[in-house]
Image (cartoon, rainbow, N blue to C red):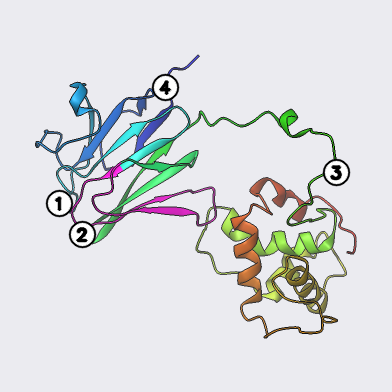
């Protein structure tokens, strides 16, 4: 059984060497030089030895930061004086956290992360894999009584889910800033699995989803409220934020026949 909890993968051309494996409690310092500079790091009081990742770029601080491995997460310290670091979740369709200058031991929850360092006229990256995420046993939730009402009840066999999946596809396939498809593009994407699809049916399902996911009031409501602008963007943002569509579910775009809502 592996004793390490995270793996740090230097980007091509940033630092030579193999992947760096860290066990819980171990640290990795990174920066432009591999020489200690007197900056206090987590664990220094214990006198422990620290590994280093050299990023030889004039836009990176000599002592840019430190990674500390935990059992089910890792933390990042930003030791630069002016640059904000960004930790992206490449599997999260734009999900990210920002680590402000001087922030110490900020916990990072992602299983697969990309650390982005602004360096002069470019952005440098390295990856961190945290394979030891733990989850509660599903049997814990099997308690007697009425079932919990779902916040976003979606039937994945319905055509509205097909439309939602088509809207989210680009960002779920590793392009978090991809522009959303137009209604015409959604029609073209869905035609192989929904031959009768047309612009009106896609737009009807988008409107239906906006009501179903409580982004707008139904037409029969006494007060319908203001017009919802950016409806597609709002739907995709909500769906990706709460994992209403996952990358593995995009198979519905190629394999399944949907039924009407």
User: Which quadrant would residue 38 be assigned to in this image?
Assistant: top left
Q: Which residue is mark 4?
A: 4
Is residue 55 found left or right of 210 in the rendered image?
Answer: left
Residue 146 point in image, percent of width and height: 85, 43
The residue segment tinted magenta is 77-104
How far is the residue under mark 3 from the one under mark 4?
42 Å
Residue 9 point in image, percent of width and height: 37, 35
User: Which quadrant would residue 213 be assigned to in this image?
Assistant: bottom right
Under tag 3, what secondary structure?
Answer: loop
Which residue: 60% across, 71% down? 233
Residue 148 is marked as none
* Label tally: 4
Q: Which residue is mark 2?
A: 120
How far is the residue under mark 2 from the one under mark 1?
8 Å
**Disc 4 or 1, which lies upstream in sequence?**
4
* Residue at the extreme left: 37
* Residue at the extreme front: 145
């Amino acid at each position: 059984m592996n004793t390490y909890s995270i793996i740090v993968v230097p980007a091509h051309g940033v630092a030579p060497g193999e992947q760096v494996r860290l066990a819980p409690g171990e640290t990795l310092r990174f920066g432009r030089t591999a020489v200690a500079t007197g900056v206090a790091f987590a664990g220094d009081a214990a006198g422990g030895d620290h590994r280093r990742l050299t990023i030889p770029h004039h836009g990176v601080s000599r002592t840019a930061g430190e990674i500390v491995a935990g059992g089910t997460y890792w933390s990042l310290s930003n030791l630069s004086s002016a640059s904000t670091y960004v930790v992206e979740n490449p599997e999260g369709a734009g999900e990210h956290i920002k680590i402000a200058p001087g922030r110490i031991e900020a916990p990072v929850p992602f299983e697969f992360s990309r650390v982005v360092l602004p360096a002069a006229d470019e952005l440098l990256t390295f990856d961190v894999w945290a394979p030891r995420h733990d989850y509660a046993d599903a049997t814990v939730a099997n308690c007697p009584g009425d079932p919990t009402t779902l916040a976003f009840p979606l039937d994945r066999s319905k055509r509205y889910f097909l439309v939602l999946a088509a809207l989210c596809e680009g960002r779920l396939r590793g392009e978090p800033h991809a522009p959303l498809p137009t209604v015409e593009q959604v029609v073209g994407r869905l035609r192989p699995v929904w031959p009768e699809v047309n612009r009106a049916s896609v737009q009807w399902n988008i409107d239906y989803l906006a009501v179903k996911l409580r982004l707008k009031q139904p037409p029969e409501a006494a007060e319908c409220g203001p017009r919802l602008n950016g409806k597609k963007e709002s739907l995709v943002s909500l769906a990706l934020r709460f994992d209403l569509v996952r990358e593995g579910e995009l198979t519905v775009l190629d394999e399944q026949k949907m039924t009407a809502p």
